[in-house]
Image (cartoon, rainbow, N blue to C red):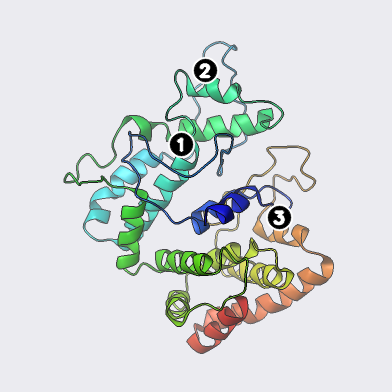
Amino acid sequence: MTRFRNIALVLVLFVVAVVGAIYLLRDATEEAPPGEAQSHETSETTVVVVNAPPTRAARPDEGPKAKTVTSSDPFELIRDLAKTAYDGDGRAQYVISRELDRCELNLQMIRKQPGDPEAFIWSLPDSSWPQPMKEAAIAEVRRCIRLLKEDPFAELPPRQGSYTVKYWMDRAVDADYPLAVAERSLNDWGRKTEGGSFRQRADPESLSKLVKAMTTGDPEIALTIGFHQSMYEDPARKTSASAWMLAACRLGADCSANSRTVPFWMCYDPNYPSCSADANVELMVSSALTPAAYGEAYSQSQAIEEALRSRDPDTIRKLLEKLL
């Protein structure tokens, strides 16, 4: 799993650097609570930036730092959902797990660093960390930094091991929340196939769980399934996975540049050939595939879309069997 996780961290999915794969591929271990050191498998030079706005961040030597205004506050979101999640709401449990995980991808690199975290980021070598990447990392750290200093679960009963990513994801799965069940089933499939490095059919239990999740009609599940499978090298699987993403986008999934299901860098590096402020998942899919492969993906997506609209479990199962 470690080998595949490292591959996923550097994989170029479209023609930009896709960095959200770790959400779908890693087997979350028990982490320390917010505000304490957490242990994730990562190299010292690997930092994942997810959905950070490409704003200009002040260098340490440029005088007082301007306060960054962000569109969301993960600390407040998590704290607001904490009681509902504790009482058993699967969606709240899932959202908390994803928000904690998303922030930890960046906070992990500064937890044990002395001094100003922004100065540390600026000190990273320019050869591997160009300025746009540093700006994006700083923006995401600023968005999440409160989770290092305060506990969003302070009003919940004390819990040995604290309230971690794994705790909330496990509860969301136990609550049968469809997106959580789908992600866990895909992770199980990835482990059994060494991250997709050899062909193995999905086991009946995982397949049944995915079918059940898909029949709820949530297009984000289809987008999650497609994104997960698109990361493998097999051309036929990549084409079919792209078809799932295209169908999901037409069904109403969030396929914007800020999609939480498919997080990726957009225009942080002007050298990316398809950099566009209007880019989205559908455009990136079309850029990543040859014209022939895109035509095949689009054709498959029409059958997938029809099956998902009808919520027919037998047809959905056959389509999943073809993909997995």
Q: Locate residue 306: give its quadrant.
A: bottom right
- 1 or 2: mark nearer the eye: 1
Q: Is 274 placed left or right of 64 in the picture?
A: right
Q: Could you tell me which residue is drawn at 49 percent across and 42 percent down?
A: 105
Which residue in the structure is indicated by mark 2?
65
Q: Residue furthest right?
A: 291
Return the x and y of residue 80 as percentages of the image width and height: 29, 46
Q: Nearer the viewer, residue 147 or 6?
A: 6
61 above or below 288?
Answer: above
At label 3, the amino acid type is Phe
First in sequence: mark 3 or mark 1? 3
- Return the residue at label 3: 14
Question: Disc 3 or disc 1, which is closer to the eye?
Answer: 1
Is any atom of residue 254 visible in this view?
A: yes
Residue displayed at 78% across by 39% down: 271
Q: Disc 1 residue type?
A: Gln
- Mark 2 or mark 3, earlier in chain: 3
Distance from disc 1 to disc 2, alpha carbons, whole Å, reads 22 Å
Viewer-nearest of labels 2 and 3? Answer: 3
- In the depicted view, which residue is nearer to us: 95 or 231? 231
Res 259 seen here: no
**Residue annotated with mark 1:** 108
